[in-house]
Every structure is written in C-alpha cells, then in structure tokens.
Amino acid sequence: MDQEQSQIHIDAVYEWMGKQIDEKKVKPNSNLGKATCYGLKHWEKLTAFMKVEGMPLSNIALERLIKRIVLHRKNSLFYKTEKGAYVGDVLMSIIQTANEAKINVPELSGCSH
C-alpha cells in the first residue's frame, strides 16, 4: 500500500477518533477514551512517518535487529574476559553489517590462509 492509500486510512482513523469523543460515544476516563484522547493530542507526532517519502509502514526489520542486539548483550554476560567480550562485539558488528549488505554470513566463517 502506498502513502496516498495509507493517508486515506489514517485520515479515517483520525475522523473516527474525533467522533468518539465529540459525540460522547466513549467515556474520556475509560481505557479506550484515554487512548483516543492521547491519539488525538499527539496525532501530529504519531503520523509524522507519513511525511517521509518511502518510509516503511512497518518497523519489523528494526525490531528484529534490536532483538539480535538484546540477545547478544544478554549472552555477552557470560564472556570470561573483557577481551573476549570485545572480540564478540566486533564479530557481532561484522556479522550484522554483512547481513545488511546481503552477504551470506556462513561464507565468512572459513579462513583462507
């Protein structure tokens, strides 16, 4: 779905939220009411991504990357030395850079000396 089509749906959500509050279809102190009021109050910030051409509508790729970083950080607690942790960090950086560059990481594991 492109940005023009997405904007139609975003505008419809904004209109629906406004009606819920204006027509008192939802109580402002209910969970839905609080979420609706928050959405309306922060609408400009919540929809800023629509102003950037080519911005993906999903952040799943970034979430996957963050998950890898968190997992590496958790596992790094078990390095025996500070130097071992440093080497692990460097290797993780190389592996993630290779992944982003679409290089098959298992090919990097063989040493050709």
Image (cartoon, rainbow, N blue to C red):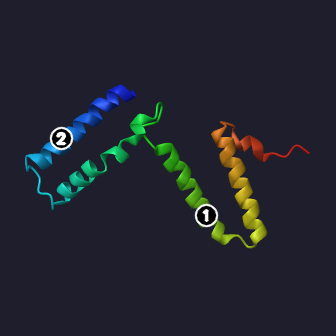
Q: How many neighbours does mark 2 have within 10 angstroms: few (below 14), some (14-19), or many (20 or more)?
A: few
> Label 2, on which residue?
16
Tell me whether the residue at label 1 lies in contact with that at label 2, contact meaning CB atoms closer than 8 angstroms.
no
Q: How many marks?
A: 2
Would you say 88 lies left or right of 50 here? right
Quadrant in which residue 58 is drawn: top left
> Could one spot residue 1 in this view of the protein?
no
Of labels 1 and 2, the one closer to you: 2
Q: How many neighbours does mark 1 have within 10 angstroms: few (below 14), some (14-19), or many (20 or more)?
A: some
Residue at the limit of the structure toward the bottom, as seen here: 80
Residue 70 at x, y percent in the picture? 56, 60
Q: CA distance from mark 1 to mark 2?
A: 42 Å
Amino acid type of the residue that numbered disc 2 sits on in the rendered structure: Trp
Q: Residue at x 75, y 41 (%)?
A: 107
> Label 1, on which residue?
73
Amino acid type of the residue that numbered disc 1 sits on in the rendered structure: Arg
- Above or below, 67 against 20 in this view is below
- The one of 106 and 33 positioned closer to us in this rendering: 33
Q: Residue at x 68, y 45 (%)?
A: 97
Q: Residue at x 46, y 44 (%)?
A: 59
Q: Residue at x 29, y 36 (%)?
A: 10
Q: Earlier in the sequence, mark 1 or mark 2?
A: 2
- Determine whether the residue tagged by mark 1 lies in a helix, strand or loop: helix
Would you say 51 lies left or right of 8 here? right
Rendered-image quadrant of the C terminus: top right
- Above or below, 95 against 88 in this view is above
Residue 17 at x, y percent in the picture? 19, 45
- The one of 61 and 40 positioned closer to us in this rendering: 40
> Could one spot residue 60 in this view of the protein?
yes
Residue 18 at x, y percent in the picture? 17, 44
